[in-house]
Image (cartoon, rainbow, N blue to C red):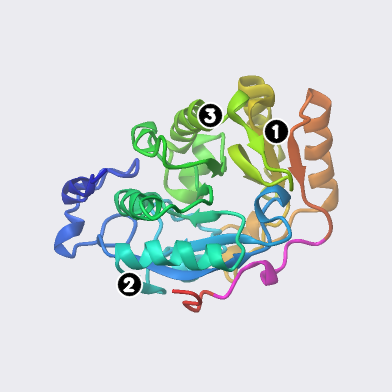
Amino acid sequence: MDIRHILNNCILCPRKCGVDRTSGHTGACHMTDTVRVSRAALHMWEEPCISGENGSGAVFFSGCALGCCFCQNKAISGGKAGKDISISRLCNIFFELQDKGANNINLVTPDHYIPQIISAIDMARSRNFKLPFVYNCSGYETAEMIQLLDGYIDVYLPDFKFMSPDLSAKYSNAPDYPEHAKASISEMVRQCGGDQTRFDDDGIMQRGVIVRHLQLPDHLDDSKSIITYLYNTYKDSIYISIMNQYTPMPGIENRFPELGRTITSSEYDELVDYAIDIGVENGFIQEGDTADESFIPAFDNEGV
């Protein structure tokens, strides 16, 4: 399916900037229509059913339309790092990761490249590519764009960052984030969640939806609202991943003092206990000191 004409007046993300990215102009995502990738390698730090023992074949795309002030991947989200590649090269990267033993192809921050990714998947499947595709995204998508991925994506791995429009406006300049996260996740669940969820014999998810929430310091109530919404809406049709790895980036405390620290173990434990108390069973939690920059990979064009 060739839908690259969308890039002529780009409306791929909720910001709908309308830029002609095919003419070399950059949109809200900071990118033209040329695919830029900063890393393509086995990644061990996802949920166990994604990384497993072999690793997830993570393809880190440069650029991002959300632009969270606390982004841990700022080296690439602004679009400056990475290497420009063709769609055929992207397809070949999929096969190279498969040959390295990857459990899946993990498309990280892919929203602004949906047309190109669809073309690369079509190309790969015409060559009998076998691995499932994981769509690892921010939650700031439109349901209409997620609909374009129906039949292409096997596992959705979205964030649900904020329930409060005030918080999403403050930290991401996106007061409409909650409404779009709700709508896009609903479409993801329609495509891959519920009774469609399945795992292979090694416990690697082959189809399903895992919604991630990164807990922020001093915002426990918003985190509880997100967990409540997800569980009340989807029950066991999805998995919920509660993350404690928030890492304050240098200088963030000057703009937002409340974000200048990691979350405490008591904050995290309270959120996990709350999730258990309301009935969440399909979930993942993190243990130990995960707020460490070692969890941030080197965006050095490995595998690109």
Point 17% across, 47% down: residue: 5
**Quadrant of the image for the N terminus?**
top left
Left or right, 209 with reference to 87 = right
* Residue situated in front as seen by the camera: 205 or 266: 205
Quadrant position of residue 70: bottom right
Q: Amino acid at mark 3?
A: Val
Label whose residue precedes the other's in the sequence (2 or 3) = 2
**Mark 2 nearby-residue class (10 Å; few <14, some 14–19, many ≥20):** few
Point 84% across, 51% down: residue: 265
Q: Is residue 235 above or below residue 62?
A: above
- Spatial CA span between label 1 and label 3: 21 Å
Q: Amino acid at mark 1?
A: Lys
Q: Secondary structure at mark 3?
A: helix
- Spatial CA span between label 2 and label 1: 40 Å
Q: Secondary structure at mark 2?
A: strand
What residue did someone put label 3 on?
A: 189
Asked if residue 292 shows in the view, the reply is yes
* Residue situated in front as seen by the camera: 173 or 15: 15
Label whose residue precedes the other's in the sequence (2 or 1) = 2
Left or right, 241 with reference to 183 = right
What residue did someone put label 2 on?
A: 84
Q: Amino acid at mark 2?
A: Asp
Q: Are marks 2 and 1 in contact (CB under 8 Å)?
A: no
Asked if residue 222 shows in the view, the reply is no
Give coordinates of residue 135: x percent, y percent.
Answer: 50, 47
Left or right, 301 with reference to 218 = left
Q: Are marks 1 and 3 in contact (CB under 8 Å)?
A: no
Q: Is residue 45 above or below residue 143?
A: below
Dot label at residue 224: 1
**Mark 1 nearby-residue class (10 Å; few <14, some 14–19, many ≥20):** some
